[in-house]
Protein backbone atom coordinates (compact mmCIF):
# COMPACT_ATOMS: atom_id res chain seq x y z
CA UNK A 1 0.00 0.00 0.00
CA UNK A 2 1.18 3.51 -0.79
CA UNK A 3 2.10 5.75 2.12
CA UNK A 4 2.26 9.47 2.78
CA UNK A 5 4.24 10.95 5.66
CA UNK A 6 2.49 13.86 7.37
CA UNK A 7 4.84 16.17 9.27
CA UNK A 8 2.57 16.55 12.28
CA UNK A 9 2.46 15.56 15.93
CA UNK A 10 -1.27 16.36 16.20
CA UNK A 11 -3.42 13.22 16.68
CA UNK A 12 -6.57 15.05 15.58
CA UNK A 13 -5.03 16.01 12.24
CA UNK A 14 -3.74 12.45 11.75
CA UNK A 15 -7.30 11.14 12.21
CA UNK A 16 -8.66 13.64 9.70
CA UNK A 17 -6.00 12.66 7.15
CA UNK A 18 -6.56 8.93 7.72
CA UNK A 19 -10.18 9.35 6.82
CA UNK A 20 -9.44 11.79 3.95
CA UNK A 21 -6.90 9.42 2.35
CA UNK A 22 -9.13 6.32 2.57
CA UNK A 23 -10.56 6.85 -0.90
CA UNK A 24 -7.07 7.08 -2.44
CA UNK A 25 -6.04 3.81 -0.78
CA UNK A 26 -3.11 5.54 0.86
CA UNK A 27 -1.80 4.79 4.32
CA UNK A 28 -1.04 7.80 6.49
CA UNK A 29 2.03 7.88 8.69
CA UNK A 30 3.06 10.75 10.90
CA UNK A 31 5.84 11.88 13.18
CA UNK A 32 4.02 10.00 15.96
CA UNK A 33 4.94 6.70 14.21
CA UNK A 34 8.70 7.29 14.13
CA UNK A 35 10.72 5.15 16.50
CA UNK A 36 13.04 8.06 17.19
CA UNK A 37 10.96 11.10 18.13
CA UNK A 38 11.79 14.30 16.22
CA UNK A 39 11.98 17.68 17.87
CA UNK A 40 8.99 19.93 17.19
CA UNK A 41 9.66 22.39 14.35
CA UNK A 42 9.56 25.93 15.69
CA UNK A 43 6.74 27.79 13.93
CA UNK A 44 8.44 31.13 13.49
CA UNK A 45 6.42 32.28 10.44
CA UNK A 46 3.69 34.92 10.50
CA UNK A 47 1.50 33.19 7.89
CA UNK A 48 0.03 29.69 7.57
CA UNK A 49 1.95 29.36 4.29
CA UNK A 50 5.31 30.13 5.89
CA UNK A 51 4.74 27.71 8.78
CA UNK A 52 3.43 24.89 6.59
CA UNK A 53 6.47 25.19 4.32
CA UNK A 54 8.83 25.37 7.28
CA UNK A 55 7.43 22.13 8.74
CA UNK A 56 7.40 20.33 5.37
CA UNK A 57 10.96 21.34 4.39
CA UNK A 58 12.48 20.65 7.81
CA UNK A 59 11.01 17.16 8.05
CA UNK A 60 11.58 16.30 4.36
CA UNK A 61 15.25 17.20 4.78
CA UNK A 62 15.52 15.21 8.00
CA UNK A 63 13.86 12.06 6.60
CA UNK A 64 15.03 12.54 3.00
CA UNK A 65 11.61 11.70 1.59
CA UNK A 66 8.49 13.54 0.34
CA UNK A 67 6.48 14.99 3.19
CA UNK A 68 3.11 16.74 3.58
CA UNK A 69 2.70 19.37 6.30
CA UNK A 70 -0.44 21.12 7.56
CA UNK A 71 -0.57 24.51 9.21
CA UNK A 72 -4.05 25.49 10.24
CA UNK A 73 -6.10 27.61 12.59
CA UNK A 74 -9.20 29.63 13.28
CA UNK A 75 -9.72 33.26 12.16
CA UNK A 76 -12.45 35.17 14.01
CA UNK A 77 -13.61 38.44 12.42
CA UNK A 78 -14.70 40.07 15.70
CA UNK A 79 -11.17 39.40 17.04
CA UNK A 80 -9.48 40.87 13.96
CA UNK A 81 -8.47 37.42 12.75
CA UNK A 82 -7.19 36.03 16.06
CA UNK A 83 -6.24 33.36 17.09
CA UNK A 84 -5.03 32.83 13.48
CA UNK A 85 -1.55 31.39 13.16
CA UNK A 86 -1.34 31.35 16.95
CA UNK A 87 -4.38 29.05 17.33
CA UNK A 88 -2.49 26.10 18.86
CA UNK A 89 -0.93 28.19 21.63
CA UNK A 90 -3.67 30.78 22.12
CA UNK A 91 -4.10 30.12 25.85
CA UNK A 92 -0.46 29.19 26.52
CA UNK A 93 2.55 27.16 25.46
CA UNK A 94 1.05 23.81 26.54
CA UNK A 95 -1.29 23.73 23.48
CA UNK A 96 -4.45 22.83 25.41
CA UNK A 97 -7.56 22.58 23.17
CA UNK A 98 -9.99 23.11 26.08
CA UNK A 99 -8.21 26.20 27.38
CA UNK A 100 -7.90 27.61 23.87
CA UNK A 101 -11.59 27.32 23.04
CA UNK A 102 -12.67 28.71 26.41
CA UNK A 103 -10.40 31.70 25.90
CA UNK A 104 -12.14 32.36 22.57
CA UNK A 105 -15.62 31.98 24.13
CA UNK A 106 -14.65 34.40 26.90
CA UNK A 107 -13.40 37.00 24.40
CA UNK A 108 -16.63 36.71 22.40
CA UNK A 109 -18.94 36.89 25.42
CA UNK A 110 -21.88 39.20 24.62
CA UNK A 111 -21.05 39.42 20.92
CA UNK A 112 -24.32 38.79 19.00
CA UNK A 113 -24.65 35.87 16.61
CA UNK A 114 -24.47 37.95 13.44
CA UNK A 115 -21.05 39.23 14.53
CA UNK A 116 -19.55 35.83 15.38
CA UNK A 117 -18.38 34.95 11.87
CA UNK A 118 -15.15 32.97 11.52
CA UNK A 119 -13.31 30.59 9.26
CA UNK A 120 -11.02 27.61 9.61
CA UNK A 121 -7.92 27.88 7.43
CA UNK A 122 -5.67 25.00 6.38
CA UNK A 123 -2.50 25.38 4.33
CA UNK A 124 -0.94 22.18 3.02
CA UNK A 125 2.69 22.15 1.92
CA UNK A 126 4.36 19.31 0.04
CA UNK A 127 8.13 19.19 0.12
CA UNK A 128 10.05 16.65 -1.93
CA UNK A 129 13.73 16.16 -2.68
CA UNK A 130 15.01 18.18 -5.69
CA UNK A 131 11.62 19.62 -6.67
CA UNK A 132 9.76 22.84 -5.96
CA UNK A 133 7.33 22.71 -3.05
CA UNK A 134 3.54 22.79 -3.51
CA UNK A 135 1.55 25.10 -1.22
CA UNK A 136 -2.27 25.30 -1.24
CA UNK A 137 -4.89 26.88 1.06
CA UNK A 138 -8.39 25.66 1.93
CA UNK A 139 -10.98 27.40 4.11
CA UNK A 140 -14.31 26.66 5.77
CA UNK A 141 -16.64 29.54 6.71
CA UNK A 142 -18.85 29.47 9.80
CA UNK A 143 -19.77 31.02 13.15
CA UNK A 144 -18.63 30.61 16.73
CA UNK A 145 -21.21 29.15 19.14
CA UNK A 146 -21.80 30.44 22.69
CA UNK A 147 -20.64 27.19 24.29
CA UNK A 148 -18.92 23.93 23.32
CA UNK A 149 -21.20 21.28 21.74
CA UNK A 150 -20.21 17.77 20.56
CA UNK A 151 -17.45 15.25 21.26
CA UNK A 152 -15.97 14.43 17.86
CA UNK A 153 -12.97 16.00 16.19
CA UNK A 154 -10.38 18.13 18.00
CA UNK A 155 -9.25 21.69 18.65
CA UNK A 156 -11.93 24.30 18.12
CA UNK A 157 -14.43 21.86 16.51
CA UNK A 158 -16.94 22.05 19.45
CA UNK A 159 -17.39 25.83 19.07
CA UNK A 160 -17.45 26.09 15.25
CA UNK A 161 -20.69 25.82 13.30
CA UNK A 162 -20.00 25.56 9.54
CA UNK A 163 -22.27 27.71 7.36
CA UNK A 164 -25.52 26.01 6.34
CA UNK A 165 -25.23 23.60 9.28
CA UNK A 166 -27.18 23.43 12.54
CA UNK A 167 -24.49 21.27 14.08
CA UNK A 168 -20.96 22.06 15.21
CA UNK A 169 -17.95 20.39 13.61
CA UNK A 170 -17.71 18.24 16.74
CA UNK A 171 -21.22 16.88 16.12
CA UNK A 172 -20.36 15.73 12.60
CA UNK A 173 -18.86 12.35 11.77
CA UNK A 174 -15.33 12.53 10.42
CA UNK A 175 -16.61 11.81 6.90
CA UNK A 176 -19.14 14.65 7.17
CA UNK A 177 -16.47 17.02 8.51
CA UNK A 178 -13.99 16.14 5.78
CA UNK A 179 -16.50 16.82 3.00
CA UNK A 180 -16.73 20.50 3.97
CA UNK A 181 -13.61 21.19 6.00
CA UNK A 182 -10.70 23.53 5.33
CA UNK A 183 -8.46 20.43 5.32
CA UNK A 184 -10.67 18.61 2.81
CA UNK A 185 -10.79 21.71 0.61
CA UNK A 186 -7.00 22.17 0.68
CA UNK A 187 -6.45 18.48 -0.07
CA UNK A 188 -8.62 18.68 -3.20
CA UNK A 189 -6.16 21.27 -4.54
CA UNK A 190 -3.19 18.89 -4.25
CA UNK A 191 -5.10 15.84 -5.48
CA UNK A 192 -2.90 15.46 -8.58
CA UNK A 193 0.17 15.02 -6.40
CA UNK A 194 -1.67 12.68 -4.03
CA UNK A 195 -2.77 10.41 -6.88
CA UNK A 196 0.82 10.20 -8.11
CA UNK A 197 2.18 8.86 -4.83
O1 LIG B 1 -10.03 20.82 11.82
C1 LIG B 1 -9.84 21.48 12.86
N1 LIG B 1 -10.74 21.47 13.87
C2 LIG B 1 -10.54 22.14 15.00
N2 LIG B 1 -9.43 22.86 15.26
C3 LIG B 1 -8.51 22.90 14.28
C4 LIG B 1 -8.66 22.24 13.06
N3 LIG B 1 -7.58 22.46 12.30
C5 LIG B 1 -6.78 23.24 13.01
N4 LIG B 1 -7.34 23.51 14.23
C6 LIG B 1 -6.73 24.28 15.32
C7 LIG B 1 -6.11 23.33 16.31
C8 LIG B 1 -4.83 23.99 16.71
O2 LIG B 1 -5.15 24.90 17.77
C9 LIG B 1 -4.47 24.83 15.49
C10 LIG B 1 -3.49 24.12 14.59
O3 LIG B 1 -2.17 24.52 14.89
P1 LIG B 1 -0.91 23.90 14.08
O4 LIG B 1 0.31 24.57 14.48
O5 LIG B 1 -1.27 23.87 12.64
O6 LIG B 1 -0.90 22.37 14.55
P2 LIG B 1 -0.27 21.66 15.82
O7 LIG B 1 0.77 22.50 16.46
O8 LIG B 1 -1.37 21.21 16.71
O9 LIG B 1 0.37 20.36 15.19
P3 LIG B 1 1.57 20.28 14.10
O10 LIG B 1 2.17 21.64 13.96
O11 LIG B 1 2.51 19.27 14.66
O12 LIG B 1 0.94 19.81 12.83
O13 LIG B 1 -5.69 25.06 14.79
MG1 LIG C 1 2.15 23.49 15.37
Image: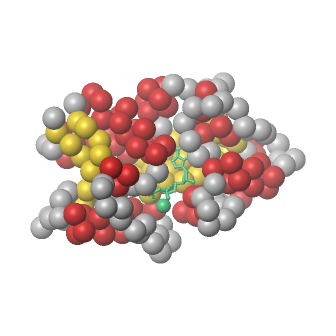
Is residue 74 rendered to the left or right of residue 26?
right
- Is residue 15 visible in the rendered structure shown here? yes
- Left or right, 66 with respect to 144, comes to left
Q: Does residue 115 lie above or below 133 as drawn?
A: above
**Which one is in front, 1 or 196?**
1
Image vertical order of residue 39 relative to residue 9, above or below: below
Q: Is residue 123 above or below residue 28?
A: below
In screen coordinates, is 145 left or right of 37? right
Visible residue check, residue 133: no
Which residue is more in the foreground, 130 or 9? 9
Q: Residue at position x 14%, y 43% from top?
A: 196
Q: Quadrant of residue 24?
A: top left
Which residue sits furthest bottom?
A: 44
Quarter containing the C terminus: top left
Q: Residue furthest right?
A: 110
Q: Residue at x 47, y 29 (%)?
A: 174
Q: Residue at x 24, y 46 (%)?
A: 4
x and y, in percent, of residue 30 in the image:
33, 50
Name the spot of residue 147 as percent of width and height, x first: 77, 38
Residue at 48% of width from left, 43% of height from top? 12
Q: Position of residue 98 (x, y in %)?
A: 68, 48
User: Is 194 in front, or is 42?
Assistant: 42
Locate residue 195 relative to residue 110 in the image: left or right.
left
Quadrant occupied by the N terminus: top left
Q: How is the image coloured?
A: secondary structure
Instruction: Count numbered badges in the picture.
Output: 0
Amino acid sequence: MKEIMIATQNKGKVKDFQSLFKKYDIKVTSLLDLTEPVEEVEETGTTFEENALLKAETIANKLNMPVLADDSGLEIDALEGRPGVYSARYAGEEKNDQKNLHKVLEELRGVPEDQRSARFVCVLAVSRPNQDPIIRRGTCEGTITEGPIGDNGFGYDPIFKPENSNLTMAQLTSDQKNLISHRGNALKKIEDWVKNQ
